[in-house]
């Protein structure tokens, strides 16, 4: 069951993170993908600047995760003022958050491992 969930999650994440669409807002430094081991009951914090071009229609920013299936992992996004913009708090380690940046600013992304075991999480953003 865990392997099937992982395979389905990898396929979903790959589809989401490789999908090129003019409706996506890009981070200042471009799209990234990476892997990180989240220790049990810990969180990591990332600061990512998403750009908004004035002459373009408003576009989506995205951040996605897929874990190894061992624990629940949640994602929270906060704007530069510290206001929560969106979150993914489902009962799994698969998640995607999507929002429309109002202006170019730095967003704080918090990825929390809610379980007591370590979880190897692949993360990425546009």
Image (cartoon, grey):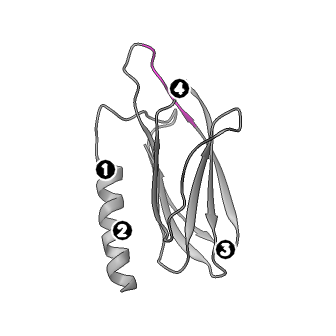
Q: Earlier in the sequence, mark 1 or mark 2?
A: 2
Q: Earlier in the sequence, mark 4 or mark 1?
A: 1
Determine the CA span between mark 4 and mark 1.
24 Å
- The residue identified by callout 1 is 18
- The residue identified by callout 3 is 39
Examine the structure image and report whether residue 53 is included in the region drawn in magenta: yes
Q: Eyeballing the image, is 64 above or below 25?
A: below
Task: Give percent across and percent down for residue 42.
Answer: 70, 68
Q: Check disc 1: other Cα within 10 Å, few if <14, some if 14-19, many if 20+.
A: few
Determine the CA span between mark 2 and mark 4.
30 Å
Task: Give percent across and percent down for residue 76.
Answer: 60, 52
59 or 83: nearer the viewer: 83
- The residue identified by callout 4 is 102
Report the residue at 51% width, 71% height from top. 91
Determine the CA span between mark 3 and mark 2.
20 Å
Closer mark to the observer between disc 4 and disc 1:
4
Determine the CA span between mark 1 and mark 2.
14 Å
Examine the structure image and report whether residue 97 is included in the region drawn in magenta: no
**Highlighted range, magenta:** 49-54
Q: Earlier in the sequence, mark 2 or mark 4?
A: 2
Q: Earlier in the sequence, mark 4 or mark 3?
A: 3
SS category of the residue bearing label 2: helix
Q: Is 98 positioned to the left or the right of 81 in the image?
A: left
Determine the CA span between mark 4 and mark 3.
33 Å
Pointer 2 with pointer 4, Cβ within 8 A: no
Kindly give the residue lying farthest to the top in the view shown.
55
């Amino acid at each position: 069951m865990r392997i099937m969930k992982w395979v389905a999650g990898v396929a979903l994440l790959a589809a989401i993170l490789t999908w090129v669409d003019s409706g996506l807002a890009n981070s200042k430094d471009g799209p990234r993908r990476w892997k990180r081991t989240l220790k049990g009951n810990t969180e990591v914090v990332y600061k990512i600047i998403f750009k908004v071009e004035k002459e373009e229609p408003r576009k989506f920013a995205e951040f996605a995760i897929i874990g190894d299936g061992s624990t629940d992992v949640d994602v929270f996004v906060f704007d530069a003022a510290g206001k929560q913009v969106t979150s993914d708090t489902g009962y799994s380690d698969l998640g995607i958050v999507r929002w429309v940046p109002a202006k170019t600013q730095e967003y704080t992304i918090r990825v929390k491992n809610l379980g007591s075991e370590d979880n190897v999480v692949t993360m990425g953003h546009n």
